[in-house]
Image (spheres, grey):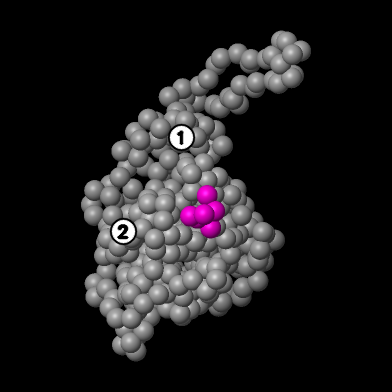
Amino acid sequence: MSEKNKTNIDTIETGNTGMDTSPIEENTSASDAGTVHHRRKRYSGKYPRKFEEKYKELQPEKYKDDIDKIIQKGKTPAGMHIPIMVKEILEVLDIKPGEIGMDATLGYGGHSEKMLEKLQGKGHLYATDVDPIESVKTEKRLRDKGYDESILTIKRINFRNVDKVADNGHKFDFVLADLGVSSMQIDNPKRGFSYKTDGPLDLRLNPEAGESAAERLRSLSQDEMINLFIENSDEPYADKIAKEIIRAYHQGARIETTTELRNIITKALAFVPEKERSDTVKKSCKRVFQALRIDVNSEFEVLYDFLNKVPDCMAPGGRIAVLTFHSGEDRLVKQFFKEMKRSGIYSDCSRDVIRPGKEECFINPRAHSTKLRWAVKA
């Protein structure tokens, strides 16, 4: 997973207030090195609709006031990720200057930045992420803020390889794993994570490795699809959706885009009473896309490996916090922590799940399904 992040797929508020109609500016002097300044591309209507047109949201540092207004309205700016449960995580991890820690899912870098602030320039933070697109952007943001290699190491490896992250055999004093998909990945239609926008049916956290969701879906039998939708997302209409997908294949469909899959799910649920149909289709789309995403990224297997290896990578008294976003992940984390406490590997672990407050859920609707659990190394 990115490995961040983790979430609900919500409507994106735009921060634009109108269209730039200024003329194209061009250098007229040969001494100006021939640079040509181009106007932004025009878009139809008063507000930008396409992801790439939301120029204010995609430049949060430049348009800070617009971004703050969007967040205060309870929306997530396009291409940006709001870190979840920061206060609770910092309380659990109790980071002190000089400690060594790990952010297992770097994502947008929001949690990493807060942890780095706690280190006060002393100690070290390791961060991992498999996304070759977003991790580059995040690293630049953090480096520009002064976090160089002396305090922050970023490795583009899967966090299931936690045992290969730290240098010189260092043990971690604190570890965070935010298992949600990052908002940047959800918002970008080219990544294919959202059924709400048309794009390739991909869903890979690392689009350079493995098979896409479209390829994976074509390899499954009807029974395998049903099992996948039930096991990964408890889809109540798994049999009807799988049957409709197989029918589409038999009729020559390829199902290579998010829209094509959404339309098939809509067709499969045509029997639902009209007044309930829209909401039912929306929920089933979320679950089916989630089930496919979990499968193509081997999310349960990755989490299992991480939870099994991480205690050996932690110093005595080290703290670990894990944010989950669906019941399957939460069950696995809960079982691991309890069993490892029972066997003496952890000295303590959370008895009850910690949830985000109402205020945070309003400002960041994608926090609604979040659950936080923690443990302490013996």
Residue drawn at (43%, 64%), measured in percent from left and top? 100
Q: Residue 339: where, in percent of width, then height?
A: 35, 85
Indicate the quadrant where residue 91 lies: bottom left
Which label was assigned to residue 87? none
Residue drawn at (76%, 13%), measured in percent from left and top? 30
- Where is 352 relative to 87, above or below? below
274 and 370: which is toward the camera: 370
Badge 2 amino acid: Leu
Magenta-colored span? 148-153
- Can you identify the residue that label 2 sits on? 90
323 and 321: which is toward the camera: 321
Q: Nearer the viewer, mark 1 or mark 2?
A: 2
201 and 223: which is toward the camera: 201
- Can you identify the residue that label 1 sits on? 61
Badge 1 amino acid: Glu
Q: Residue 160: where, in percent of width, then height?
A: 53, 72
Where's the C terminus, which quadrant? bottom left
Query: Is disc 1 placed on a helix, strand or loop?
Result: loop
Asked if residue 33 is among those painted magenta in the image, a careful observer would answer no
- Where is 257 relative to 38, above or below? below
Q: Which of the two labelled residues, at mark 1 and mark 2, occupies the earlier sequence position? A: 1
The local crowd at label 1, few if under 14, some if 14 to 19, many if 20 or more residues have their Cα within 10 Å, is: few
Q: Of helix, strand and loop, which mostly describes the magenta segment?
A: loop
Between the residue at mark 1 and the residue at mark 2, the CA separation in whole angstroms equals: 25 Å
Residue 104 visible here: yes
Q: Residue 80: where, in percent of width, then height?
A: 46, 44
73 and 121: which is toward the camera: 121
Which residue appears farthest toward the bottom when viewing the image?
343
